[in-house]
Image: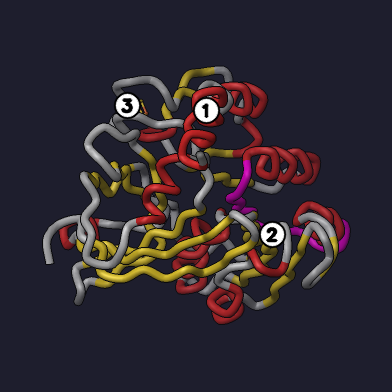
Amino acid sequence: MTEAQIISKKILAEYENTRIIKIEIYSPAIAQHYLPGQFVIIMVSEKGERVPLTIVETNLANGSINLIFQEIGYTTKLLGKLKEGDKLYHIVGPLGKPTEIKKFGNVLIIGGGVGTAEAYPVTKALKQQNNKITTILGARNKNLIILENEFKDISDEIYITTDDGSYGIKGFVTDVLEQLLKERTFDLVYAVGPVVMMKAVSNLTLPYNIPTIVSLNTIMVDGTGMCGSCRITYNGSIKYVCCDGPEFDGHKVDWDEIINRNKTYLLQEQTILKFIQD
Ligand code: FES
């Protein structure tokens, strides 16, 4: 086994042209230094882009890390084509600040889409600190729900929503959140998923003054604070998601700026995707 080699690969979910895949990668140094909340940046090929992916689990005995990703753009589709035994061109990490793990009390975890995978290691660590965990997981439909059993094992209470009502509660994670906020309070809300979802969650918890941590997934290049591509405005100042984050207080994030900046390469992404399909 050599550094960055794929030990195993498993398709977790599949629907139409969307697949969510788990890969186990040999990288003993990253596995050894990892803490929940941190991520790696991978390159599939020498001329490819650099993509940040959250580390979901580590296996110290195997010297490996697990990554879960959705085939959404050109690079993740290339990554999805790799087989067991293939090697990534490059991997660097662990990057970013670890999550603050301590006893908060009543914690509400919200995972949307593939963000569910990113929420998993944090939830597990918070459960180990004896927090009471309520979880809301959301996906477009039943086929795209991942890690349901894993979350059931570490949650005191769990709600699952699907946009089309094919499983669990019909609607969005924010529908359940709104209802729960009317009934009780939480000491912490931790949300990971699409930017619009994290924005909506933060807007809902703000009037209740509930601390709300979000894990941001902006465009990144170097991952060390030098290129500026992951820049956000946070509480009126500039922050870099790769080294000041990826977690931030959702009430202080300039969400609209992130939504706009994430569209920077939309045209190129659409063009290259068409190319890969042709
Ligand atoms: S990725 Fe370059 S500054 Fe964060």
For label 3, the SS is loop
* Residue 185 highlighted magenta (yes or no): yes
Q: Amino acid at mark 3?
A: Gly
Which residue was labeled with disc 2?
139
Q: Which type of secondary structure does the marked residue at label 2 adopt?
A: strand
Query: Relative to 31, is 61 above or below?
Result: below
Dot 1: few (<14), some (14–19), or many (≥20) neighbours within 10 Å?
few
As drawn, is 147 to the left or to the right of 246?
Answer: right
Residue 103 pos. (x, y %)? 51, 64
Foreground disc of the pair 1, 3 = 1
Q: Name, please, the residue furthest toward the front.
A: 278
Residue 271, which numbered label?
1
Describe residue 53's horizontal placement relative to residue 254 as left or right.
Answer: left
Magenta-colored span = 182-194
- What's the residue at 17%, 62% (across, down)? 28
Q: In the rendered structure, which disc, 2 or 1, sits on the residue that comes first in sequence?
A: 2
In the foreground, 195 or 124: 195
Q: Nearer the viewer, residue 196 or 238?
A: 196
Badge 3 crowding class, 10 Å Cα cut-off, few under 14, some 14 to 19, many 20 or more, is: some
Q: Is residue 247 left or right of residue 45?
A: right
- The answer to whether residue 61 is magenta is no
SS state under label 1? helix
Q: For the point 62% across and 60% down, which residue is it?
A: 109
Q: Position of residue 234 (x, y in %)?
A: 55, 25
Label 2 to label 1: alpha-carbon separation: 27 Å
Residue linked to disc 3: 225
**Image coords of residue 46 (percent x, y):** 22, 36
**Number of the front mark, 3 or 2:** 2
Tell me the colour scheme of the image.
secondary structure
**Rendering quarter of residue 121:** bottom left
Ligand 1 has an atom within 8 Å of the beta carbon of the residue at disc 3: yes
